[in-house]
Image (spheres, grey):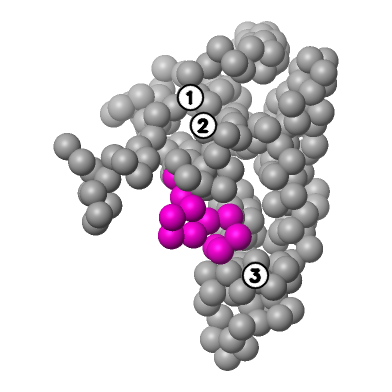
């Protein structure tokens, strides 16, 4: 199996970095190959704009979807986008490693999806959901939170993680990935916030890394998340009851 990790944290010594290193080690120990794209270290530009396209279909008006479709058809996508699409095409498993910021992923990861999931190349009117481009490939979200586990849930102070992760996981489903249950690392406390003493936190987070490595050695035991597909909707896209 080949895994591709999209790493999303600006600090090299962060806990997210430790999660990515642990994933690489665990997968490599199992005989798998691993590539990593660190969005911050490569200065990935998350903003979709006309300047990215050297061969515009319309130089007077920038329509992102139209230019993505045109660039896909003419093999003129920006180099960094074509390179990352190649990473996804080669991968059997894609891991998104990121911290929860303002109840969602960092903006650079959303921008990565805006630019990499190109219209016409990776999705079209019918090439979506269970007939998506990346069907039969696995995706796994690994996210860290600042608040402890007990703070999350419907109506809880930290919010409902299922709701907060839904947009990114549904977008992965949109382009065809089979989504494994997320791995959540709770209570990665930032400076100025503390819910437990430093020793207890350090011990807990070390144990969490062990659990993360263990999770990656038995991926075939995890039941994928369930999302609707084409047979679940009527012609207008409404759920069939």
Percent x, y for residue 157? 36, 29
Vertical position of residue 207 compared to residue 70: above or below: above
The image quadrant of residue 137 is: top right
Percent x, y for residue 72? 65, 66
What residue does disc 3 label? Answer: 73
Mark found first going from the N terminus, 3 or 2: 3
Q: Nearer the viewer, mark 3 or mark 2?
A: 3
Q: Given contact means CB atoms under 8 Å apart, are the residues at marks 1 and 2 in contact?
A: yes
Q: Is residue 155 magenta?
A: no
Q: Residue at x 74, y 26 (%)?
A: 1
Quadrant of the rendering where the C terminus is positioned = top left
Residue 224: numbered disc: 1
Secondary structure of the residue carrying numbered label 1 = loop
| Residue 112 shows in the view | yes
Q: Distance from label 1 to label 2 (Cα)?
A: 5 Å
Question: Which residues make up the magenta segment?
Answer: 119-129
Question: Mark 1 packing: few (<14 Cα in 10 Å), some, or many (20+)?
Answer: some
Q: Residue at x 37, y 40 (%)?
A: 229
| Residue 192 shows in the view | no
Q: Given contact means CB atoms under 8 Å apart, are the residues at marks 3 and 2 in contact?
A: no
What residue does disc 2 label? Answer: 179
As drawn, which residue projects farthest toward the left?
Answer: 241
Main secondary structure type of the part rendered in magenta:
loop
Q: Residue at x 55, y 63 (%)?
A: 119
Secondary structure of the residue carrying numbered label 2 = strand
Between residues 30 and 233, which one lies in front from this camera angle?
Answer: 233
Vertical position of residue 27 compared to residue 199: above or below: below
Q: Distance from label 1 to label 3 (Cα)?
A: 33 Å
Q: Nearer the viewer, mark 1 or mark 3?
A: 3
For the image shown, how many numbered marks are present on the structure? 3
């Amino acid at each position: 199996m080949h895994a591709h990790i999209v790493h999303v944290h600006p600090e090299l010594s962060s806990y997210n970095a430790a999660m990515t290193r642990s994933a690489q080690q665990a997968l490599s120990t199992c005989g798998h190959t691993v590539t990593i794209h660190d969005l911050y270290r490569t200065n990935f530009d998350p903003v979709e704009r006309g300047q990215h396209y050297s061969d515009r279909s319309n130089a007077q008006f920038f329509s992102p979807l139209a230019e993505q479709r045109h660039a896909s058809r003419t093999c003129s996508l920006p180099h960094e986008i074509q390179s990352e699409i190649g990473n996804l095409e080669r991968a059997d498993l894609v891991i998104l490693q990121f911290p929860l910021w303002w109840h969602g992923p960092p903006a650079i990861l959303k921008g990565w999806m805006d630019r990499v999931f190109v219209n016409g190349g990776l999705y079209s009117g019918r090439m979506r959901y269970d007939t998506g481009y990346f069907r039969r490939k696995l995706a796994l979200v690994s996210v860290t939170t600042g608040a402890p586990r007990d703070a999350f849930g419907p109506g809880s102070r930290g919010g409902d993680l299922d709701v907060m992760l839904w947009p990114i996981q549904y977008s992965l489903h949109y382009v065809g990935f089979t989504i494994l249950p997320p791995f959540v690392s709770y209570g990665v406390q930032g400076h100025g916030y503390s819910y437990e003493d430093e020793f207890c936190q350090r011990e807990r987070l070390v144990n969490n890394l062990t659990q993360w490595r263990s999770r990656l050695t038995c991926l075939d035991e995890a039941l994928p998340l369930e999302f609707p597909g084409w047979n679940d909707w009527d012609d207008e896209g409404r759920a069939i009851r």
